Image (cartoon, rainbow, N blue to C red):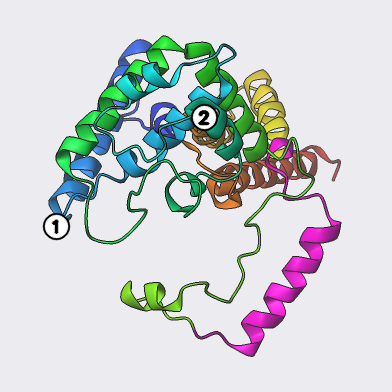
Amino acid sequence: PATLPLVALLFQWRRGVHGLERYAVAGAAWLALTVSAFGLNAAITDKQMHFWSSSLAVYDLVGTIAKTDHALPDAELERTLAGTGLLVHDDIQAKARALFNPRDFLPIISDEQRRFWDLPAYGTTPVPEATREAIGRAWADVLTSHPGAYLRYRAAVMAEVLSLTHPRPSGVVPRRDFKVPAFAWAQGVPTRTSPAQHRLTSWMSSLWKVAPIFVPWMYVILAITIAILAIARRGRRDILALCASGLAMEASLCVLAMSPDYRYSHWLVVTTCLAIVLTIARRATRSTATAPA
């Protein structure tokens, strides 16, 4: 979604093409780029891991079940979740409510005492096809049967993503120590860091603790405000495109986010900052141009 505003608002096949024709050509260009990117990604992938089944799908299931107001009998949930590899078979809804965390989906598959499924979060062994199909069927059944509960669950997650419930978002300054170094080594990721990196991490951590400049909701407000100003002042299509791109990416988190990691909001922050810089620079340029000699 982040590329659509950039291409739709800024792409121009040739000069003199305006209106509906221009946007139709831009839309076709965006579609071609998107399909090509997905095709290339599929072509260079040697093994499909289908991580949706072991991450967002089961998070949606537990979150929706937890947020359903009325009681869901165990027998009904057993039928719905049949074939998914469910590990919990009594007080399913109550345990889903106790397990659900809008800040973290991993306990659903990793908590040794409370997890609902034993599914891979990483590695090279995909979820079996029969299990994937059962999870997909259960996902569609639960979400279509309880749309209100799904929306309440996603609203709770999005409130965490935007830092509406916590003054400081998580993951702004990644820690330098690795919890599982062997996993990093297996992926070819080095774990050694320099003293300079540690000093910078310490400085950024101190800034993160005292300065409220990282909260995503602030950048949402700034992006909307700058976009409105760009619309009001014609000829600022690039600024509008930047703001729309960041907002579109952030909006996609309404259905995609599985934790409030700050990295999910990086594009919103970057595009908003670029839009601010462009707005200030153009205002300064215009003031200089109109100043008396």
User: Which numbered dot is residue 46?
Assistant: 1
Q: Is residue 69 above or below residue 279?
A: above
Dot 1: within a 10 Å radius of its alpha carbon, few (fewer than 14), some, or many (20 or more) residues?
few
Q: Residue at x 23, y 36 (%)?
A: 132
Determine the image quadrant of residue 28: top left
Q: Position of residue 252 (x, y in %)?
A: 48, 31
Q: Quadrant of the N terminus?
A: top left
Can residue 34 be seen here? The reply is yes
User: Which residue is situated farthest in the bottom direction here?
Assistant: 195
Q: Position of residue 75 (x, y in %)?
A: 38, 18
**In the depicted view, which residue is nearer to us: 118 or 10?**
118
Q: Residue at x 52, y 72 (%)?
A: 179
Q: Residue at x 37, y 34 (%)?
A: 57
Q: Position of residue 240 (x, y in %)?
A: 57, 30
Q: CA distance from mark 2 to mark 1?
A: 32 Å
Q: Earlier in the sequence, mark 2 or mark 1?
A: 1
Q: Which residues are magenta?
A: 192-218
Q: Position of residue 289 (x, y in %)?
A: 75, 41
Residue 95 included in the magenta stretch of the image: no
User: Which numbered dot is residue 7?
Assistant: none
Dot 2: within a 10 Å radius of its alpha carbon, few (fewer than 14), some, or many (20 or more) residues?
many
Looking at numbered disc 2 in the image, what kind of residue is underneath it?
Gly
Q: Is residue 110 above or below residue 161?
A: below
**In the depicted view, which residue is nearer to us: 30 or 217?**
217
Secondary element at image label 2: helix
Can residue 16 be seen here? The reply is no
Q: Residue at x 16, y 55 (%)?
A: 47
Determine the image quadrant of residue 71: top right
Residue 202 included in the magenta stretch of the image: yes
User: Which numbered dot is residue 63?
Assistant: 2
**In the depicted view, which residue is nearer to us: 115 or 231?**
115
